Image (cartoon, coloured by chain):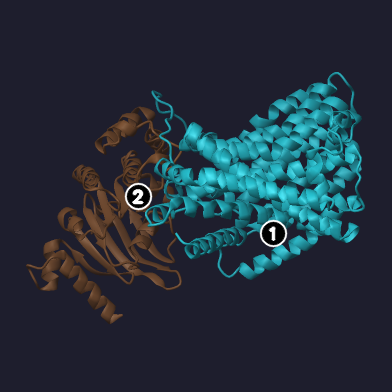
């Protein structure tokens, strides 16, 4: 393949990536391109406000930095890298399983190693561009507040984007080799979820164990962390120095990113073809269900509930998502455990975290159960009214949330019965609200389209997020300032009422 | 014919989307009959059958299934009907046996009756080795067979199939045709759309040809030949002539 053909293939890859992204932003609807772009620009502009609130005060930072400052900046870069790695693993896995053009490419008269090098580079490019877009409001705030030297942060984002893509490619292809294509999909999804959340949770766990607080900064700015940290001239701090405008550190970081990606491409592009072929030939594993078991007796709704539970239990997204939610619950659970021996007031923080997690999980479960129906014709032609079908599906969501969150609430009873009651009510209301939103905005879709659920109705997505946040805040305020909880609860209920009013399924 | 003598009686069935899809259609299908509904793409076959199966609400008209008003009492009508679409819709994460268990549960069939029936059906469709494998790895033909077994496990009296042989290999197609033939011999009524005219020619007791949402010809093969005025013509030739005439009239 000559360089012209390679350039042409690169353009093809970029066009595909752009259209996939656009379809995700516009929920696949034509004619919404302009609306999506304007919406994104407005969102990007608005994002400068929270970015200013979070990072604005650091704009005046200059070298030399003390160890605590170096640790905080380095940890932030590490967190960004972990999130990029999570995204990149997802992208690489999707290329293996979802691209329908592998047969065409592999049967064409081209050198596969070269073509797949381009594909790997396109993955790296899309991960890096996405990271640059997301970090723009934050870097802008630093540039406006602290000067052009902060522009170097773009270079650092590019460098860590390249390394994240390189590591993701290596990890995914190695997983294919080690555990086979049938298991890689699930393991990669779980890995992506754990890596994304793991870093923050690990910091929180360390903070709770050491200082009894959920604040990640407590551990990062502690004397103990400073004592363990290497000297100021160590290589470890080069990313932090590069962010602050150290040209030499930035160039070395970029060179390292490019070198790592180049090495991964050289090593893995030849294997990519083989791996892709194995994935497409064996995309669906021959999984076995339960064997010698007699058919169950029961009502039609029981049959529906059994089916929903079975599908939820076997859903790879749900496995990874539940794992992530459970991981998020580790810090509050740890705080709870600590509070048995220590009467810390920080235990109040558990309630909003738990309520928020319940709302978010119920939203996902609600979509999978209510909208994600793979055999809609079968259910629609079954001899039972649609209201009973919907009721069975809602029951499944609420039972699942109850089972997942009951142990935490029960443990809370021993620490603070009042807080346990408030948390239980908060969990129930947040889960019911998220499920109701999914019901009002239900669409017919396949469960495998879950990734796109948030783009099919942005209104439902925002309403679901605000409802969970609102009920979490209300539950926290109910414990701290009950009168404020009344206001917060009314505002959240009002938001739900407004969502219902404008939903397409009010009738 | 009295309404209770027919398996399906459709009167003035109308549905409009952007254009008129089904145009005041009248259709009567007798009990124990194998009826093939033919028509070009977009003629209104699937829309008609989806309205009969309760998947789509008609704009006007009536549907009577074995004497039950399917529009006023859809649950009772669905209890004795089965629907199989051309795109097999099954659950990837369930095994064929689990899928049939779910369908039997939805139709309220006793497990002691449903389980042996499910096993027999899957075995007769050649799926015995795959009973406990999740459907996610199945080919389209295997999925279609699972969907068909699901439609039959509750022993329906009226089976509606929309292009059930699409994607099936010759052996699987023969399995399916054999199974449907058995059901008809046992007194069940089958309505099937197909583009494979040979299947209609060989299996159907009566054939209906639909074009632009209207029934343009109906009868046994011999009756259709008689209507066409040529006794030695094939169904394919008759079908093309009918569709061309309808297109020219439109």
Q: Residue at x 71, y 57 (%)?
A: A133
Left or right: A361 in relation to B74: right
Q: Among the chains, which one is brown?
A: B
Between residue B75 and residue A424, name the one nearer to us.
Answer: A424
Task: Look at the picture and state if B118 lies above or below A49.
Answer: above
Q: Residues within 10 Å of mark 2 (few under 14, many from 20)?
A: many
Res. B153 image quadrant: top left
Task: Name the residue located 55 percent from the left edge and 54 percent from the top edge.
Answer: A443
Q: Secondary structure at mark 2?
A: strand
Q: Which residue is mark 1?
A: A501
Q: Who's the residue at 31% across and 80% down the image?
A: B250
Q: Nearer the viewer, mark 2 or mark 1?
A: 2
The subunit carrying tag 1 is: A
Give A75 or B48, whichever is nearer the viewer: A75
Q: Colour of chain A?
A: cyan
Mark 2–mark 1 Cα distance, whole angstroms, equals 37 Å
Task: Give how far across and how far down residue A165 sits, in percent.
Answer: 62, 47
Q: Where does the image place residue A74, in percent across and percent down from the top left?
A: 80, 41
- State the residue position of label 2: B84
């Amino acid at each position: 393949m000559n360089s012209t053909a390679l350039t042409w293939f690169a353009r093809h890859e970029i066009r595909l990536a752009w259209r996939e992204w656009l379809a995700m932003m516009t929920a696949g609807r034509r004619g919404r391109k302009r609306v999506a772009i304007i919406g994104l620009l407005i969102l990007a502009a608005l994002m400068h406000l929270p970015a200013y609130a979070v990072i604005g005060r650091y704009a005046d930072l200059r070298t030399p930095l003390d160890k605590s400052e170096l640790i905080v900046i380095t940890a932030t870069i590490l967190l960004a890298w972990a999130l990029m790695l999570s995204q990149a693993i997802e992208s690489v896995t999707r290329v293996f399983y979802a691209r329908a053009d592998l047969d065409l490419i592999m049967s064409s008269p081209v050198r596969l190693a070269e073509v797949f090098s381009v594909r790997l580079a396109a993955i790296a490019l899309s991960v890096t561009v996405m990271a640059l877009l997301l970090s723009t409001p934050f870097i802008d705030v630093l540039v406006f507040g602290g000067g052009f030297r902060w522009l170097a942060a773009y270079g650092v984002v590019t460098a860590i984007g390249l390394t994240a893509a390189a590591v993701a490619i290596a990890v995914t292809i190695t997983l294919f080799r080690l555990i086979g294509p049938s298991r890689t999909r699930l393991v990669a999804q779980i890995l992506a979820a754990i890596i994304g959340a793991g870093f923050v949770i690990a910091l929180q766990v360390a903070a709770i164990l050491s200082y009894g607080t959920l604040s990640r900064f407590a551990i990062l700015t502690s004397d103990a962390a400073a004592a363990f940290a290497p000297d100021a001239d160590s290589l470890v701090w080069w990313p932090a120095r590069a962010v602050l405008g150290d040209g030499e550190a930035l160039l070395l970081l970029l060179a390292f990113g490019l070198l790592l990606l180049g090495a991964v491409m050289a090593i893995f592009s030849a294997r990519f073809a083989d791996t892709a072929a194995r994935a497409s030939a064996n995309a669906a594993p021959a999984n076995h269900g339960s064997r010698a078991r007699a058919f169950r007796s029961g009502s039609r709704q029981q049959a529906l509930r059994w089916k929903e539970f079975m599908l939820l239990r076997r859903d790879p997204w749900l496995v990874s998502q539940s794992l992530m939610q459970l991981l998020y619950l580790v810090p509050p659970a740890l705080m709870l455990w600590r509070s048995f021996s220590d009467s810390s007031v920080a235990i109040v923080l558990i309630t909003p975290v738990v309520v928020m997690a319940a709302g978010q999980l119920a939203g996902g479960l609600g979509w999978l159960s209510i909208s994600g129906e793979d055999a809609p014709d079968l259910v629609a032609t079954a001899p039972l009214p649609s209201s009973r079908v919907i009721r069975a599906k809602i029951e499944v969501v609420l039972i699942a949330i109850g089972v997942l969150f009951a142990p935490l609430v029960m443990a809370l009873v021993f620490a603070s019965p009042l807080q346990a009651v408030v948390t239980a009510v908060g969990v129930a209301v947040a889960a019911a609200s998220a499920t109701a939103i999914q019901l009002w905005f239900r669409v017919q879709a396949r469960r495998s389209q879950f990734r796109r659920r948030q783009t099919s109705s942005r209104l439902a997505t925002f309403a679901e997020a605000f409802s969970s946040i609102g009920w979490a805040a209300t539950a926290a305020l109910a414990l701290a300032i009950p009168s404020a909880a009344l206001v917060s609860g009314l505002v959240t209920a009002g938001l739900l009422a407004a969502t219902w009013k404008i939903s397409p399924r009010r009738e | 014919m009295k309404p209770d003598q027919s398996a399906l009686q459709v009167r003035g069935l109308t549905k409009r989307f952007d254009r008129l899809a089904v145009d005041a259609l009248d259709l009567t299908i007798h009990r124990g009959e194998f009826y093939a509904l033919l028509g070009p793409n977009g003629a209104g076959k699937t829309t008609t059958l989806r309205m009969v199966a309760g998947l789509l609400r008609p704009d006007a008209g009536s549907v009577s299934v074995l004497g039950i008003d399917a529009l006023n009492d859809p649950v009772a009508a669905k209890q004795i009907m089965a629907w199989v679409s051309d795109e097999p819709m099954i659950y990837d994460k369930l095994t064929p046996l689990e899928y049939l268990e779910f369908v039997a549960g939805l139709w309220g069939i006793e497990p002691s009756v449903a389980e042996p029936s499910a096993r027999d059906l899957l075995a007769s469709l050649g799926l015995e080795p795959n009973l406990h494998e999740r459907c996610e790895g199945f080919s389209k033909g295997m999925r279609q067979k699972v969907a068909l077994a699901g439609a039959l496990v509750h022993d329906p009296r009226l089976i509606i199939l929309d292009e059930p042989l699409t994607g099936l290999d010759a052996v699987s197609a023969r399995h399916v045709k054999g199974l449907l033939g058995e059901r008809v011999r046992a007194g069940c009524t089958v309505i099937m759309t197909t583009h494979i005219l040979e299947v209609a020619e060989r299996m159907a007791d009566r054939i209906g040809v639909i074009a632009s949402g209207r029934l343009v010809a109906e009868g046994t093969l011999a009756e259709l030949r008689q209507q066409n005025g040529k006794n030695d013509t094939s169904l394919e030739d008759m079908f093309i002539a009918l569709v061309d005439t309808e297109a020219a009239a439109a």
